[in-house]
Amino acid sequence: MQRRTAVTLMLNCALLAIAPAGHSAERWVAGEHYFVIQPAQPTPRHDGKIQVIEVFSYACPGCNRFYPVADRLRTSLPADAELDFLAASFRPDEDWPTFQRAYCAARELGIDMKTHDAMFDAIWKTGELAVYNERTQRATVPAPAIPGIARFYARLTGIKPETFIATATSFAIDVKMRQADELIKAYGVGETPSIVVNGRYRLNPVSAGGYDETIELVKWLVAKEGADIKASRGR
């Protein structure tokens, strides 16, 4: 009787020891919590890092609520992964293409990471670049335009407004905007914020089940992608 009890206890302890790993593997279900991108899309990175992309718009209220979560996600990613951003233009009626142009220009000028959170605050907190008038409950008229956004960037970074405007209205930025639209379509992204992991998986806070769950799921997919990459190299 004592021997059977001891064996039972040992088996129970062993099961408990492996339970978290089994639970983690079963927690995230493809087609429910995340979605496989078919076909997988190549990533622009060439340094070997796993690319995590947030598809967003500064004019998207959901993205505004999510940006502190994106900051947490960035700092929680392992060394072999990096968070990047891809601006969407889904809503011309809410000035999304203008903000997509502004982001592409800021990125081209190397000031995007210095100003990313501040852009959300200018739209949704201070109202400097507001797209929505709380008093009238309507879209801001006139909507924010590149000259005003250029002045905002100039104050934050010291870059000359005319330099920002010239970059934002250039043919190169037109091309980058079209490329962004095409890539977002190839990813199958239809809402913001959405997260894409290495061109192979997409998810959003709703599919993941919440903000904390989004961070957990992205890290799990990064680990899965890392393991798949190592396995493919070992073949």
Image (tube, grey):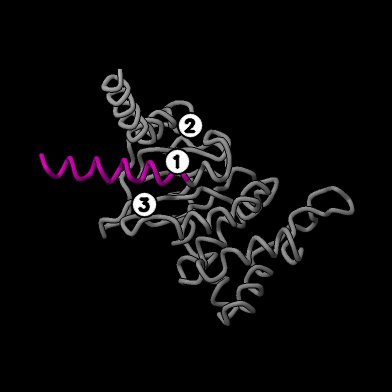
Of all residues, the one furthest to the left in this rendering is: 235
Tell me the kind of residue under disc 1: Leu
Q: Nearer the viewer, mark 1 or mark 3?
A: 1
Q: Are marks 1 and 2 in contact (CB under 8 Å)?
A: yes
206 vs 56, nearest the viewer: 206
Disc 1 versus disc 2: distance between alpha carbons? Answer: 8 Å
Give SS at disc 2: loop
**Residue 132, percent across and down?**
78, 53
Give SS at disc 1: helix
Tell me the kind of residue under disc 3: Gln
Question: What residue would you read off at disc 3?
Answer: 51
- The numbered mark, 1 or 3, whose residue comes first in the sequence reads 3
Tell me the kind of residue under disc 2: His
**Residue 188, placed above or below residue 59:** above
216 vs 129, nearest the viewer: 216
Disc 1 versus disc 3: distance between alpha carbons? Answer: 14 Å
* Residue interval drawn in magenta: 216-235
**Residue 231, percent across and down?**
18, 40
- Give the quarter of the figure containing the N terminus: top left
Q: Residue 122 vs residue 68: left or right?
A: right
**Residue 18, percent across and down?**
32, 33
Question: What residue would you read off at disc 1?
Answer: 217
Residue 33, disc: 2
User: Which residue is located at x 32 percent, y 22 percent?
Assistant: 5
Q: Nearer the viewer, mark 2 or mark 3?
A: 2
